[in-house]
Amino acid sequence: MIAETVCSAVSVAGLGIAVVTAYRKRFLAAARIAAYSLVPIGLVMTGVVGWVADTAFSPSAWAGFCVLGGAWVLFTATRAVERRRGGTRKERAETQAAQREAVAPAASAPSLGQGRANASRPAPQPTARPRGAGDDFSDIEAILKKHGI
């Protein structure tokens, strides 16, 4: 009852402001104000205000909103975890299978290796040098010496 009275008062006040605005020869603004002022009384007449008032003071309605909120939180959390992992289980299986099929299992050299002219030449062997405790910082020492530090 109080909500309907407040909405009616707001509509009457808005229509009064629209009349004053129209008196000042601002008809477009007056029409817009009149449209806005008719919304609250329209909501009362359709029963939306009564439904909102009944819902606002109903514990079961609030419990329903809490359940909906919990469902929304679960949905967003699962989507976030799914995006971090890289998709659904099926998508991950497909990408792993595609990675396994990228190189032939019995291939001794990469598929996109050197051409025929270079195939007769053996690839140079990398020189293996023993790495001791002193060799760990040899690159850093060379850079520092180069800069005079």
Image (cartoon, helix red, strand yellow):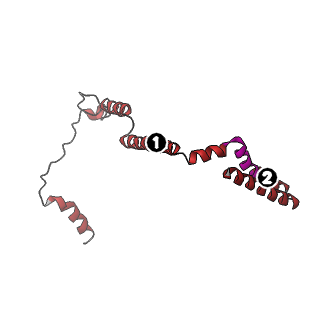
Looking at the picture, how far across and down is residue 148, in whole percent? 25, 72
Which residue in the protein does label 2 denote? 34
Which residue in the protein does label 1 denote? 67
Which residue is nearer to you in this view: 40 or 119? 40
Disc assigned to residue 57:
none
- Give the residues drawn in magenta, as a range: 36-47
**Mark 2 nearby-residue class (10 Å; few <14, some 14–19, many ≥20):** many
Which residue is nearer to you in this view: 94 or 141? 94
Image quadrant of residue 99? top left
Q: Is residue 87 above or below residue 1?
A: above
Q: Nearer the viewer, mark 2 or mark 1?
A: 1
- Residue type of the residue flagged with mark 1: Val
Q: Residue at x 36, y 41 (%)?
A: 85
Disc 2 is placed on an element classified as helix
Disc 1 is placed on an element classified as helix
Q: Is residue 34 magenta?
A: no
Outermost residue to the bottom: 149
Which residue is nearer to you in this view: 37 or 142? 37
Q: Is residue 20 above or below residue 97?
A: below
- Residue type of the residue flagged with mark 2: Ala
